[in-house]
Image (tube, rainbow, N blue to C red):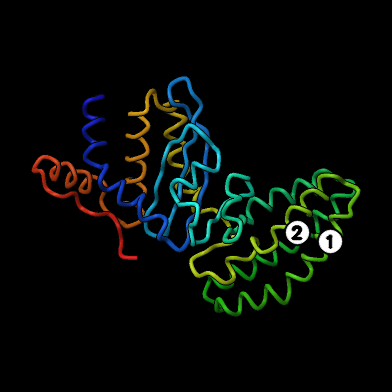
Amino acid sequence: MVKLQVRVTEALTPCYAQLKSALPQTHAANCDETPTKEGSRKAWLWVAAAQLFTVFWISLTRAATAIQGVLGADYRGVVSADRYGGYNSFNKRRQVCWAHLKRDFQALVDGGGAGAEIGTRLLTQLRHVFDHWHDYQGGNITRRSMAARIRCRVQNDLWETLEDGMQCPHAQSAALCTNLFHRWDQLWMFLTHAGVQPTNNRAEQVLRHAVIWRKLSFGTQSAAGSRFVETLLTIIETCRQQNRDLLDTLTTVLEAQNHHTPSPSLLPAM
């Protein structure tokens, strides 16, 4: 089994390397990470999902260098992610996930006290954002109209709520509002960049399959095992995005290796 694993990794490596090297040229990437194991060491399974392909990689660190090493420190696209500090180097072109914010706002409401009022106001404004976004997604309004509605009907109210929240005696509310106040531009990248969404759901959806693998396998036992997993997960998800037959793709790649011919490309025209 290990020999077959090594053989498949070698055959798929050119396809994987091509996709990975193309990530810095994409206009947007949804990114996320989840803990895993490599032998006895803690590791992290990262994902970057572009519009037509996805790349997974396993790193022994959750530090910013793990994502910078793949996207590049000067990545010019929009990075969609949660508020984890490992993505702070992309703050100038970062879309903060509103789905994560919904959980944060609900926590303020559930906590009661002075923070509940702030949380309720924040949730109301979040619902308005998604109402306009869903109207656009449903084809009822244009992207331009969606952006105009949010700027006119939501942004001013949210700004006032954040200002009030920063003065709130509830420490958690004040900290969250202060953080979002300083991330203001990161809340609205989806208004001006086609292909960018207000949530990071795309990354979470593709990561779900990898999480199921992790739960069943408990991680990998070696660096070679990690290379096999990250490569195969990348090919599987990319085939799913491009409506390619996975078995046919794997067969074609292995046949190319057997005949010493170039591997087929999974890189779409960008």
Q: Which residue is mark 1?
A: 163
Q: Considering the image in quadrants, where does the N terminus appear?
A: top left
Placement of 118 over or under 185, stated as above or below: above
> Does 249 sit above or below residue 44?
below
Instruction: Determine whether label 1 and label 2 are within 8 Å by CB.
Output: yes
Q: Nearer the viewer, residue 121 or 185?
A: 185
* Circle 2 Cα neighbour tier, 10 Å, few/some/many (<14 / 14–19 / ≥20): some
- Identify the disc placed on residue 181: 2
Residue 224, image x and y in percent?
33, 29
Answer few, some or many: residues within 10 Å of disc 1's Cα (few below 14, many 20 plus, some between 14 and 19): some
Position of residue 201 in the picture relative to residue 182 (left or right):
left
Disc with the residue nearer the chain's start (1 vs 2): 1
Above or below for 252 versus 39: below
Q: Amino acid at mark 2?
A: Phe
Residue 127 location (% of width, % of height) = 69, 63
Which is nearer the eye, 14 or 103?
A: 14
What kind of element bears circle 1? helix
Q: Is residue 249 left or right of residue 127?
A: left
Indicate whether 108 appears above or below 76.
above
Tell me the amino acid under the disc marked 1. Answer: Glu
In the rendered image, residue 50, in percent from the top left (x then y), is placed at 43, 57
Secondary structure of the residue carrying tag 2 is: helix
**Residue pushed farthest top?**
40
